[in-house]
Amino acid sequence: MAEDEPKPTQLDMPLVLDEDLTKQMRLRVESLKRRGGKRQDGEKLLQPAESVYRVDFIQQQRLQFERWDVLLDKPGKVTITGTSQIWTPDLTNLMTRQLLDPAASFWRKEDSEAMDWNEADALEFGERLSQLAKIRKVMYFLITFSKGVEPANLKASVVFSQL
């Protein structure tokens, strides 16, 4: 890039815990347990270590994925799985076929401040987000917490360049 050309603007879009949606999905699990009911064929029930997050795309067009900014304030692991769901959870249950591959995993080891991740999957997933942003204002994610971390330990965003 020539020095006189302006650098592309970077947009930092945070992954925000959707407490209402997470609660709604947990109520679905509790309701099935209480009634002795079964999930719908192919339905994805929220597990105790999972929470629903969202990204509100502040811009939808001309985005190029740059990177994930994921920070755990203590050792542990998170796996971020995108969904193709446009959610109305009171009307529509999340189905396993709506979970997007690949998922991106990020972890922090004991005695380390640095974050590690599965780079190829995280990059592919991020690039896919650039395409999905064109047709969505909001994107939902399931984040699975393991090895001792929970939502309070996570700060995450996806960074795009504006083309």
Image: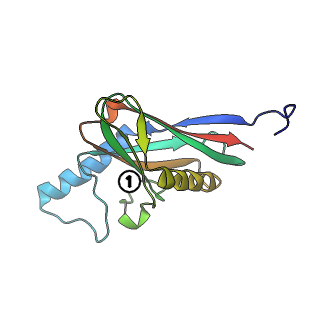
Residue at the image position 32 percent from the left and 42 percent from the top: 77
Q: Residue at x 51, y 42 (%)?
A: 55
The residue at 63%/39% (across/down) is 58
Q: Quadrant of residue 70?
A: top left
Q: The C terminus appears in which quarter of the rendering?
A: top right
- The image shows residue 162 at horizontal and vertical percentages of 71, 41
Disc 1: which residue = 89
Instruction: Return the residue found at the far bottom.
Output: 41
Between residues 38 and 132, which one lies in front from this camera angle?
132
Q: Is residue 119 above or below residue 93?
A: above
Give the structural element (helix, strand or loop) at label 1: loop
Asked whether, in this view, residue 159 is left or right of residue 145, the answer is right
Q: Is residue 144 left or right of residue 68?
A: left
Give the percent coordinates (x, y) of residue 8: 74, 37
Residue 53 percent location from the top left of the image: 42, 43
Please state if 52 lies on the left or on the right of 39 as rendered: right
Q: How many marks?
A: 1
Question: Can the viewer see residue 17?
Answer: no
Residue 60 percent location from the top left of the image: 66, 47
Question: How would you rate the neighbour count of disc 1 (Cα within 10 Å): few for under 14, some for 14-19, many for 20 or more?
Answer: some
Regarding residue 28, the answer to whether it shows in the image is yes
Look at label 1 and name its amino acid.
Pro
Asked which quadrant contains residue 135, the reply is: bottom right
Res 96 quadrant in image: bottom left
Looking at the rendered image, the quarter that the N terminus falls into is top right
- Compared to residue 135, the image places residue 77 above or below, namely above
Q: Is residue 1 above or below residue 98?
A: above
Residue, x 23% and y 46% (percent of image)? 48
